[in-house]
Image: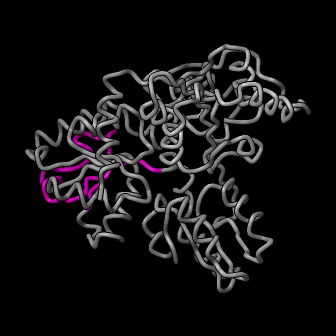
Amino acid sequence: MTTAQTQELDVQPSPLALLLLGREADPRSERGVECPGDLPSPSDPDLVARARAAKEKLGDKVFVLGHHYQRDEVIQFADVTGDSFKLARDAAARPEAEYIVFCGVHFMAESADILTSDDQKVVLPDLAAGCSMADMATAEQVAECWDVLTEAGIAEQVVPVSYMNSSADIKAFTGKHGGTICTSSNAKRALDWAFEQGEKVLFLPDQHLGRNTAVRDMGMSLEDCVLYNPHKPNGGLTTEELRAAKMILWRGHCSVHGRFSLDSVNDVRERIPGVNVLVHPECRHEVVAAADYVGSTEYIIKALEAAPAGSKWAIGTELNLVRRLANRFAAEDKEVVFLDKTVCFCSTMNRIDLPHLVWALESLAEGTLVNRIEVDKETEAFAKLALERMLALP
């Protein structure tokens, strides 16, 4: 469509479109757009040397965390790598570090701020590094959902369980309403605990992890699960449907893992005879059901480490990690391929690039605190309560 046609139709950019273009900001959203200061050019040949020099100048004052989905150019400077919760705990275990530079996304940096001391400052190199899944559940939407459950007469029976991939506001809501947080590796334990506390679970914000855990790991049926759509009146559900459900799943998903399809699984099996299909539980239910193995990013890494030489693997998770694993295990004669034929990076995770990391480290080395992620005290208290319940799970 041309500009003239757009003007003729009087099409106006939506608030979300403006937000993504960096022309607007939403303080209640995972995404931010402000990044003061001049970034070095991506073509600067000295970026690696500059990052190394700034990190060395900071010494023990800085601790750099790198999520598995980060670019190789960034991950090389990480003091530790891991999934979001492991990294937040690693940060808390380094109280001597004044600055925690989190190479990940916004909700991860929030979790690190919640779990670290007040003296530590958490920095996100690019505030625009958000998470589309976490953005799919806002505090206002979840509060409205709870009103719907209350009107249906079931709120007292419902225990909220929120995925780690959620904002601090959602974690705080969970803590305030007697719920717990889960990761992709302990979701079953969290749900077992929740069903000991109540009769139903409100699972936020990833419908696929909730459904896969309930059906695949806990023996529930698909009919035990209903999907709450925050954009429809009453979530698009009747009172009878809510009362009959065991799992009330929030209509959210990972934009990366949601791309994998049953066709992807069938196609890779045809192309690579004998291939093992290993996927993340954020994938759709039909993909998980058709896979040979299902597990978190840490599980995926350990599975490949334990795999025999000569084995073949198709991995359904973010491409940066898959490519890194393919290079790592090629020397051991293990063939590792991406499950889908199309490229599937996490676009927001990839916003943390080398220029942003250099800018953040050099700013800190010069005594300038930038892009600090700070959760307010009330939100922090309730969010920490939910996280502590998870830590206490058997």
- Placement of the C terminus among the 4 image quadrants: bottom left
Specify whether residue 84 is in view: yes
Residue 252 shown in magenta: yes
Residue 318, quarter of the rendered image: bottom right
Q: Please tell me whether residue 143 is drawn above or below residue 23 in the rendered image.
A: below
Quarter location, residue 377: top left
Whole-percent x, y for residue 47 in the image = 84, 32
Q: Residue at x 60, y 26 (%)?
A: 99
Q: How many marks?
A: 0
Residue at 62% in and 67% down: 315
The residue drawn where x is 37% and y is 48% is: 251
Q: Nearer the viewer, residue 131 or 181?
A: 181
Range of residues picked out in magenta: 225-253
Q: Is residue 221 left or right of residue 273?
A: left
Q: Decide: is 110 above or below 308.
A: above
Q: Using the image, determine if residue 66 lies above or below residue 375.
A: below
226 drawn magenta: yes
Taking the view exactly as shown, the residue that stands out farthest to the left is 153
- Residue under the point 45% across and 40% down: 134
300 or 52, which is in the foreground? Answer: 52
